[in-house]
């Protein structure tokens, strides 16, 4: 998943290449950028980063993205495939100048196979789930018929129960 099914804009592609080179590690794309329900400029681009040293990567990303350490959120996630509890860090990043937003997830490289396996389950979807996701995104992004909270809830249900998986257990750990 180092490449994307949907074409990135030239600006976004250049940004991700520069980031990968700066971090000296590949970036792994998942989520809607790998499916038929990607809406350019509106869907965020989901990216996994695997490393032997999460702290080092976060320091480098702080510099590259011009963000603060507190912008990274620690989380715990129970994987559906094997019930393994994993920890990682997330940061949302919006680049208005280049016209995209991204959500980066940083993990220890020891759990790379588990994470990629989990993401692959939500990449190739039945046509009716893909269709429903596109419809949901039209209602949210273009027609503004539903709010963000309902959109996120319905999308989560389609990507879990809709394809026969239990809900994800995902909790952000607030360090305060």
Image (cartoon, rainbow, N blue to C red):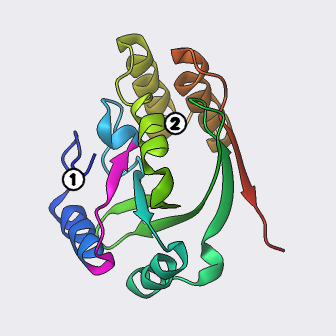
Q: Earlier in the sequence, mark 2 or mark 1?
A: 1
Q: Residue furthest front?
A: 110
Q: Residue at x 20, y 62 (%)?
A: 13
| Residue beneath disc 1 | 8
Q: Which residues are magenta?
A: 22-30
Query: Is 165 placed above or below 55 here?
Result: above
Query: Is 30 placed above or below 13 here?
Result: above
Q: Is residue 54 magenta?
A: no
Task: Give the camera-side residue of 82 and 20.
Answer: 82
- Rendered image quadrant of residue 95: bottom left
- Indicate which disc residue 140 carries: 2
Q: Residue at x 36, y 32 (%)?
A: 37
Q: Residue at x 21, y 53 (%)?
A: 8
Task: Give the camera-side residue of 49 and 144.
Answer: 49
Alpha carbon separation for disc pair 2 and 1: 22 Å
Query: Is 6 placed above or below 10 here?
Result: above
- Rendered image quadrant of residue 48: bottom left
Q: Is residue 22 left or right of residue 144?
A: left
The x and y percentages for residue 68 are: 58, 84
The x and y percentages for residue 144 are: 54, 38
Residue 1 in view, yes or no: yes
- Rendered image quadrant of residue 176: bottom right
Task: Give the camera-side residue of 9 and 168.
Answer: 168
Give SS at disc 2. helix
């Amino acid at each position: 998943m180092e490449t994307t099914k949907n074409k990135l804009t030239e600006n976004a592609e250049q940004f991700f290449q520069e980031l990968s080179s700066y971090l000296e590690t590949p970036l792994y794309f998942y989520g809607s950028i790998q499916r038929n329900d990607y809406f350019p400029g509106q869907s965020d681009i989901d990216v996994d980063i695997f490393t032997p040293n999460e702290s080092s990567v976060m320091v480098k990303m702080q510099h590259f993205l011009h963000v603060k350490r507190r912008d990274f959120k620690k989380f715990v996630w129970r994987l559906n495939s094997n019930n393994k509890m994993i920890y990682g860090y997330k940061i949302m990043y919006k680049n208005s100048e280049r016209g995209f937003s991204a959500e980066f997830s940083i993990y220890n490289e020891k759990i790379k196979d588990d994470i990629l396996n989990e993401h692959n389950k939500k990449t190739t979807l039945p046509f009716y789930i893909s269709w429903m996701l596109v419809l949901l995104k039209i209602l949210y992004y273009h027609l503004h018929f539903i709010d963000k909270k309902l959109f996120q809830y319905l999308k989560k249900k389609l990507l879990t129960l809709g394809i026969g998986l239990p809900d994800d257990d995902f909790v952000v750990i607030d360090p305060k």
